Structures are given as structure tokens and as C-alpha cells.
Amino acid sequence: MTDYVRGKVTELTPTRVVVETGGIGYAMEISLQTYSALEHKDEATVYVHSQVNPRDGSQVDYGFAGKDERALFQLITGVSGMGAASARLVLSSMSGDEFRKAVLSEDTGRINAIKGIGPKTAQRLILELKDKIAKGDDVPSGEIFKVVDNQAVEEATQALVMLGFAKSAITKAIRKFTAEHPDAKVEQIIKAALQLL
């Protein structure tokens, strides 16, 4: 599974990017948000989400300028009735922060204003995502803990996920510990989080 592609931007349209690395061009579908971020770049790192079409087995790769947008895309596609095309429309219509704000404030009108999102779908998005967004499930751990050592937090989070703990609970426990111990090492973070989980 490809996590990201770093290389030369050889083709860029508002809906598609091709990044060449090692003589291979990786084509990915993108949102307008990612298009704006990549517009004036000759080289870029694009984070990948691959999706297989259950009908014909074909694979489509979606590209994102940042992990934050990819995490939000994955959260939106996890909502019943929301496919990749709808999630891309959401992320093309508003920024991640605007979407989070609309969900947390239960602004159905703002979400309903997105083309293809009806009132019922807007309500479903709010209902299914409000708690997850409030807990920070849509933000990669490295984004949440910018004040501390990202690498240590990332590794500790991955280790705890592998142990079977829920990401929301891990995030809460690590946030609590690192607020008081910003210079903590991976082992210290894991041990402290295990006591809090």
C-alpha cells in the first residue's frame, strides 16, 4: 500500500495530478484544495489513499497535499452513503477547518450548500462525524501534537493502535501526558498512555 509519492509534478489539473518518481508517473485524483496547494510547485509530496471499485476491481488513487486532508477524506467516506466522489466535492468546496467548524456547530445549511449534498446527507454527516471530529479522530497524531516531538508521538500512537486500543482514546491519553511532558521519549509516552487507557 502506497502512503505517499514524492517527485516531479508533471501534470496538474483541478481534478488530477501526475507525480513522477523513479521514472514512473503516479496519477491521482485530487480536490481543489490539493490543486491550490500544488499549483506553483515543480516537486511535491502527495499523500495517497487507494480505493478499489467493488464492481470491476479497478483501483483509483486519490492524492492529498497533506495528511490532514487525507484523514478527513477517509473519515467522510466512512459515513454511510458518502463515496469518494462526494468526499472530494466536500473538500473542494471548503477547507478542512471550515468543514470541521460546520459539523461541530451543526450548520446543516453550510454543508447542504455543497453540490450533491442534500439535507438528509448533511444531517447524517453531522450525526456520524461530530463526536469523531471533537475527539480529533480526523487529525493525524502528528498534526495534533505540533508542540511536541512529532516522531515520538507518531510512533507511540502506532504502537498503541497495534496493541488494539482505539485511536480516540490513545489521542486523549497522549495529549494529557505530553501537555506536561513535551520532551518525552517514545517509551515514556507509551508507558504513561497505558496507565491512562
Image (cartoon, grey):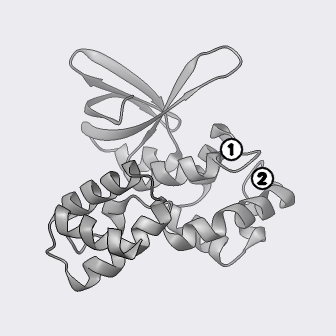
Cα separation between marks 2 and 1: 8 Å
Image quarter hosting the N terminus: top left
Horizontal side of 42 relative to 129 (left or right) equals: left
Tell me, yes or no, whether the two marked residues, 2 and 1, touch with CB atoms within 8 Å: yes
Q: Earlier in the sequence, mark 2 or mark 1?
A: 1
Please state which amino acid type lies under the numbered disc 2: Ile
Q: Residue at x 72, y 60 (%)?
A: 125
Could you tell me residue 156's position as x and y percent?
A: 27, 59
Residues 34 and 178: in front is 178
Taking the view exactly as shown, the residue that stands out farthest to the front is: 195
Q: In the picture shown, does residue 69 fall above or below 48? A: below
Horizontal side of 101 relative to 23 (left or right) equals: right
**SS for callout 1:** helix
Horizontal side of 2 relative to 191 (left or right) equals: right
Could you tell me residue 157's position as x and y percent?
A: 33, 58
Could you tell me residue 169's position as x and y percent?
A: 47, 68
- The answer to whether residue 113 is seen in the rendering is no
Q: Residue at x 42, y 49 (%)?
A: 36
Q: Dot 2: within a 10 Å radius of its alpha carbon, few (fewer than 14), some, or many (20 or more) residues?
A: some
Q: In the picture shown, does residue 51 fall above or below 72? A: above
- The answer to whether residue 94 is seen in the rendering is yes
Total marks drawn? 2
Residues 65 and 48: in front is 48
Q: Residue at x 28, y 42 (%)?
A: 41
Q: Dot 1: within a 10 Å radius of its alpha carbon, few (fewer than 14), some, or many (20 or more) residues?
A: some
Q: In the picture shown, does residue 82 fall above or below 103? A: above
**Mark drawn on residue 117:** 2
Q: Residue at x 44, y 44 (%)?
A: 35
Please state which amino acid type lies under the numbered disc 1: Ser
Could you tell me residue 52's position as x and y percent?
A: 58, 24
Q: Provide the residue designation for mark 1.
A: 86
